[in-house]
Image: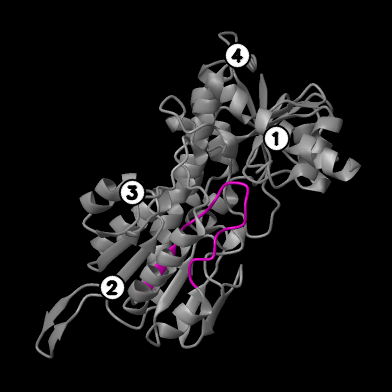
Amino acid sequence: MRVAVPKEIESGERRVAIIPETVKRLIKKGVEVSVESGAGEGSCFRNGEYEEAGAVIEPSAEALLAATDVIVKIQRPAPVELLKIREGTTIISLLYPMVNQDLVQTLASRKITAIAVDSIPRTTLAQMMDVLSSQATISGYYAVIMAAYALPKFFPMLMTAAGTIAPAKVLILGAGVAGLQAIATARRLGATVEAFDTRKVVRQQVESLGARFVEVDMAEDAQTSSGYAKELSDEYKRRQAELLHRHIAKSDVCITTALIPGQRAPILITEEMVQAMRPGSVIVDLAAEQGGNCALTEPGNETVKHGVTVIGRLNLPSRLAVHASQMYSRNMEKLLLHLTDKDGGLKLNLQEEITQGCVITMGGEVVQPKVKELLARKGESHAS
């Protein structure tokens, strides 16, 4: 099997899908690896390091993609990249197929096998392939670093000759991977931390990191069988808004991480809540790429609204490109080896749970059950 690693072309993307240490291990398993010249520069990996690991350096994307079996990327393929990919090739990358339905249909029509790393099931067996978790860890950490930089206050409590400085108060909305990492990082910096999540099962994790768990006094829970959050009742949302308004008003920093797969991010912070915060407070919206959890978030920008800094920066993992690439690459190594037979060839068994979950198109058809169902419903609505 020949694996190709192209240079990412999306603006601001500094990560690379496979790093030299992974190249070395893949080659030992019988996999050939080619890398586009300069692919690792944004994450501080030189061409020479790839060559020392055993990879072939190709001078251009055209040369790289002309004779490869599998392409491994970070971002979904852009139209200009699709033109260079030949029929029968397999592409492994972030795809978000539930929201990029046109791309899915294009990949199927081109007979390209598409593997969406964002659709890998959240199971014990798949943990080491879980790209979303590894990159969310980086986002949660970096969100706190950005907040500490923007906040005109110390994070830790200080005992000084000028008196005692109280620690910053940080509120984390959403206690998934990003939220838990944000809690841990804020605590390391000395802040007092509260965390809210609709999934009551995360209370123990939140408290184990030294944060106080904030919850709505209502029996309803919001966890799906896959571990993600789901939509809640109107009454729960009303009580949630009242609770959050009180806690947000007392916070110096609020970091939001709430996402619902395949949907726009829920609005948790209204303009009225922002107005209730003290001037100089900071909101970091990690859901900005899906529209944002704050009503005033401008995706891609940092703004000041009602005296509050609202940070909606995109693609935070790319800002820590070295470790983001390292973690993504290790995820890819485990996935590739899972999908490879003993002779180093690609094997896609659609009856196996991980493969069934992440293989979106194959043989000119959409094969992932949920995506297939979504496209069928879309076709029926257009027909009617």
Disc with the residue nearer the chain's start (2 vs 1)? 2
Disc with the residue nearer the chain's start (1 vs 3)? 3
The answer to whether the residue labelled 3 contacts the one labelled 4, judged by CB atoms less than 8 Å apart, is no
**What distance separates the C-alpha of mark 2 from that of mark 1?**
42 Å
Q: Which of the numbered marks, if any, corresponds to residue 344?
A: 4
Q: Quadrant of residue 191?
A: bottom left
Residue bearing the label numbered 1: 371
Picture residue at 77% right of the left edge, 47% below the top: 78
Mark 2 or 4: in front is 2
Picture residue at 28% right of the left edge, 52% below the top: 206
At which x and y percent is residue 143? 43, 63
The secondary structure type at the circle numbered 1 is helix
The answer to whether the residue labelled 2 contacts the one labelled 4, judged by CB atoms less than 8 Å apart, is no
Picture residue at 87% right of the left edge, 44% below the top: 382
Disc with the residue nearer the chain's start (2 vs 4)? 2
- Magenta part of the chain: 253-269
Q: Is residue 281 above or below residue 203?
A: below
The secondary structure type at the circle numbered 3 is helix
Mark 2 or 1: in front is 1
**What distance separates the C-alpha of mark 4 from that of mark 1?**
29 Å
Residue bearing the label numbered 3: 200
Amino acid bearing label 1: Val
Amino acid bearing label 3: Lys
The secondary structure type at the circle numbered 4 is loop
